[in-house]
Image (cartoon, rainbow, N blue to C red):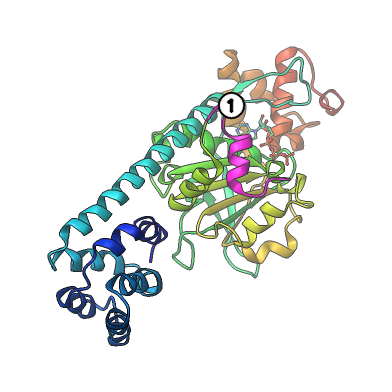
């Protein structure tokens, strides 16, 4: 039986014990629809005969009904309605309706808070976060270059190139992947992929990601750095501390309820930076908690070796190809409102050609080139 139905029976126990009549009509309907077996029937009749109807109802509510299949609750309501006890079925339905609308209210508030958080915090990229004072910000939507990923298709090392739109597409097993891993070298664009996914979701509409099972198919997207889970006993605690404003009055148990009930994508960036002693993250990856939710982890290579088998889909993100390099510099130039020719010629410069396939290096080279278009960029200038 579903948790909310068990909760409903528990919260209305007094009312039900005082009001239900275990009539022959009700018992016959419960037996016919398979809510109770002949054995249950005999037991309930014995209790009713030797004790009271209340005691038999209590046995039914606590020992029988909660252990039956998920559909048993609705069959029970149907049996009540058809045996002249419709007012009891209506009472339970109303209780459920009230609780669901409370949950819906919490969900809507949480969704709105997260969307506004992502819209505010993730709209720009800061390519040099270590330079706090003179930080340069680039508009994510303007400069983002769509990435190709390599999806591992078997254990022999075969791979297939996919786009970001294919991230959540079911692979061989035809089941929606629940544990996804993206690995890639430093500066290759893992965090930017995560940021884009959360930011796109925050924008509410599908936009260009509408062709497949995209990020908008999730009710909620929870976007974390791996370090956000350190010392947090649950995902709900991490949401409250890292994703919500401190005056947002959604309790951790409300958060837990919404996370359990909804279709949630949990994005965790930079496993390599904060995996030691990170118990909640470990439990998430193993599926000890929230195993039916979708978890997307990013990491530099070789940090998840003993956990690789836990992932349904494994992707690699590698350096830019020539076309992506060109897009990167064109978008950068358009963003800064300057001609792209000097940036395009930079891509052909012998001394730095190998550096241009790394998005971080290429961004820094663009910043250098913009500072002084006469500057002949050398590797030394970059470092
Ligand atoms: N798809 C992209 N489009 C445009 N710029 C990008 C893209 N990916 C990365 N960049 C640029 O490269 C920089 C570094 O990328 P990012 O932080 O995503 O790399 P990373 O793989 O997470 O690195 P690390 O492992 O060191 O954390 C970004 O700040 C951004 O300037």
Q: Which residues are magenta?
A: 230-248
Q: Is residue 122 magenta?
A: no
Q: Nearer the viewer, residue 134 or 76?
A: 76
Up the image or down, 21 lies above or below 247; here it is: below
Residue nearest the viewer, comparing 377 with 110: 110
Q: Is residue 359 visible?
A: yes
Residue 320 visible here: no
Q: Is mark 1 within 8 Å of ligand 1?
A: no
Q: How many marks?
A: 1
Q: Within the image, what quadrant is residue 67 found in?
A: bottom left
Q: Few, some or many C-alpha atoms within 10 Å of disc 1 (few <14, some 14-19, many ≥20)? A: few
Vertical relation: 158 (above or below) 362: below
Quarter of the rendered structure image containing ligand 1: top right
* Residue toward you, 215 or 80: 80
Residue with the mark numbered 1: 121
x%, y% of residue 79? 19, 69
Give the answer, above or below, for where 127 lies relative to 74.
Answer: above
Residue at screen point 69% across, 44% down: 226
Q: Quadrant of residue 42?
A: bottom left
Q: Seen in the image, is 151 located left or right of residue 188?
A: left
Left or right of residue 302, residue 52 in this image = left
Residue 334 on image: x %, y %: 55, 18
Report the residue that reaches farthest toward the front: 51
311 vs 258, left or right, is right
At horizontal 41% and vertical 33% (from top left) the residue drawn is 204
Q: Residue 250 or 245: which is nearer the viewer?
A: 250
- Place of residue 181 in the rendered image (x, y in percent of width and height, measured from the top left): 62, 54
Left or right: residue 318 compared with residue 273? left
């Amino acid at each position: 039986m579903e948790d909310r139905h068990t909760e409903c029976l528990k919260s209305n126990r007094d009312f039900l014990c005082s009001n239900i009549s275990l009539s022959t009509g009700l018992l016959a309907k419960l037996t016919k629809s398979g809510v109770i077996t002949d054995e249950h029937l005999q037991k309930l009749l014995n209790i009713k005969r030797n004790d009271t109807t209340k005691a038999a109802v209590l046995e039914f509510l606590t020992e029988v009904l909660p252990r039956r299949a998920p559909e048993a609750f609705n069959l029970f309501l149907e049996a009540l309605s058809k045996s002249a006890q419709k007012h009891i079925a209506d009472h339970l339905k109303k209780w459920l309706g009230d609780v669901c609308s409370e949950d819906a209210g919490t969900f809507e508030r949480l969704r709105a808070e997260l969307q506004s958080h992502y819209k505010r915090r993730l709209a720009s990229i800061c390519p040099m976060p270590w330079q706090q004072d003179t930080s340069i910000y680039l508009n994510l939507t303007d400069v983002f270059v769509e990435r190709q990923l390599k999806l591992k298709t078997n254990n022999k090392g075969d791979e297939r190139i996919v786009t970001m739109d294919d991230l959540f597409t079911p692979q061989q097993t035809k089941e929606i992947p629940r544990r996804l891993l993206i690995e890639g070298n430093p500066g290759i664009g893992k965090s930017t992929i995560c940021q884009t996914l959360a930011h796109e979701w925050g924008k509410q509409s599908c936009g260009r990601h509408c062709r497949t099972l995209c990020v908008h198919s999730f009710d909620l997207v929870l976007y974390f750095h791996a370090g956000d889970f350190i010392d947090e006993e649950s995902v709900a605690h991490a949401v409250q501390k890292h994703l919500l404003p401190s005056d947002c009055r959604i309790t951790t148990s409300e958060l837990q309820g919404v996370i359990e009930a909804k279709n949630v994508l949990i994005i965790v960036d930079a496993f390599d930076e904060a995996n030691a002693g990170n118990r909640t993250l470990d439990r998430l990856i193993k599926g000890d908690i929230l195993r039916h939710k979708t978890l997307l982890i990013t990491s530099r290579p070789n940090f998840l070796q003993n956990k690789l088998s836990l992932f349904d889909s494994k992707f690699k993100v590698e350096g830019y190809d020539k076309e992506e390099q060109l897009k990167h510099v064109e978008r950068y130039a358009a963003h800064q409102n300057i001609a792209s020719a000097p940036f395009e010629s930079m891509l052909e410069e012998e001394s730095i050609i190998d550096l241009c396939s790394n998005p971080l290096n290429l961004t820094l080279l663009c910043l250098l080139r913009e500072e002084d278009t006469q500057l002949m960029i050398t590797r030394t200038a970059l470092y």
